Image (cartoon, rainbow, N blue to C red):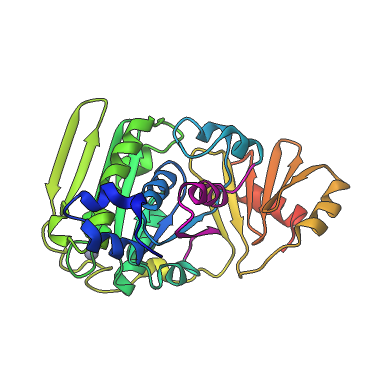
Amino acid sequence: MKVNDRYSRQILFAEIGEEGQKRLLNSRALIIGCGALGAAQAESLARAGVGKLWIADRDFIEFSNLQRQTMFTEKDAADRLPKAIACANHVREINSEIEIEAKVTDVNHSNIEQLIDDCDVVLDGTDNFATRYLINDACAKNNVSWIYGAAVGSYGVTMTIRPNETPCLRCIFPETPPAASALTCDTSGVIMPIISTVVAVQVTEALKLLTHHTDQLHNSLMQFDVWRNEWRRLALGKPTAGCPTCQLRQFEALKSESSEFAAVLCGRHAVQISPSRPTSVDLAALRRKLEAVGRVKTNDYLLRFSAGAYELTVFQDARSIIRGTDDVATARSLYAKYVGN
Ligand SMILES: [Zn+2]
């Protein structure tokens, strides 16, 4: 791949230059979660010329996403495209010279180490602390840098974590912070400008890491409130003695759970059910079976089935997002009834 005029303004930026641009083109970044944060990260990294971009997300696009998930269109929502697929499609139109791979999957203990293998940096585009602790464990274990980011309301926070160099997420937040558990997207909205603010810092940190300017990293827990006009930086000290992740290397989040995973989805009135083992489902055959009992729609990636007050979206990897309930038991029984095991 040759360095061409596309990146000329970035190359003129002395800290990047020709050398930095070559490094970017030879880098691989993984974005976990492709909602508001992740899609904006993907666009920026693609425009900057990060040579290999992997985008992992478990969900599909809905109309309520369009207010802040700036990459997606009404057509994406009408087509119910998986976010990773729609994001990859748009990013390919932005930069056809880089490699982009969409992973329509629930990132969990069974696949995260494979996903981060050979990655130069991981960007957090998730909306929950369980996945962030998983990323933290996997990155600490495999010595990969990652960039935490979160936004709720008009508040945002970000921190860059380098194994053996900085505190890890667990050093700073030994448990899910009360603010993150109380302020879910159920009870508080979010405005788009804070997404842009957090992503701007996350992507700049990624560019510094990938061009080997680690001395320029902000090295803090950086917090913003764009509505209340507050900007704060808490300098990072040393890793916390006895931190179970980066000091004791216990990696609890990477240990397997025996049964199928069920997860209540943030602000969605929905539950995700995943099969216990990697598998796949024949969507055409499932469609024929379900057409006998209700209304079914499909695209190349998923099947959507309405059953009374519930709606099941089934992906090729046999995962299902069941809308209309926050109750795991109800979701499990609907899954067993219509999708089977
Ligand atoms: Zn730690």
- Quadrant of residue 233 in the image? top left
Q: Nearer the viewer, residue 53 or 304?
A: 53
Is 110 in front, or is 94?
94
Is residue 195 placed above or below 9 in the rendered structure?
Answer: above
Q: Residue furthest right?
A: 292
Boundaries of the magenta span:
80-108
| Place of residue 264 in the rendered image (x, y in percent of width and height, measured from the top left) | 53, 47
Q: Residue at x 71, y 48 (%)?
A: 299
Residue 322 in the image: x percent, y percent? Answer: 64, 46
Q: Residue at x 54, y 39 (%)?
A: 268
Say which of 27 and 83 sits in front. 27
Relative vertical location of residue 283 with respect to residue 178 in this rendering, above or below = below
| Residue 22 appears in the figure | yes
Instruction: State the image quarter where residue 27 is shown.
Output: bottom left
**Which residue, as the protein is rendered here, is positioned at the far front?**
5
* Of 227 and 7, the residue lying toward us: 7
Residue 94 magenta: yes
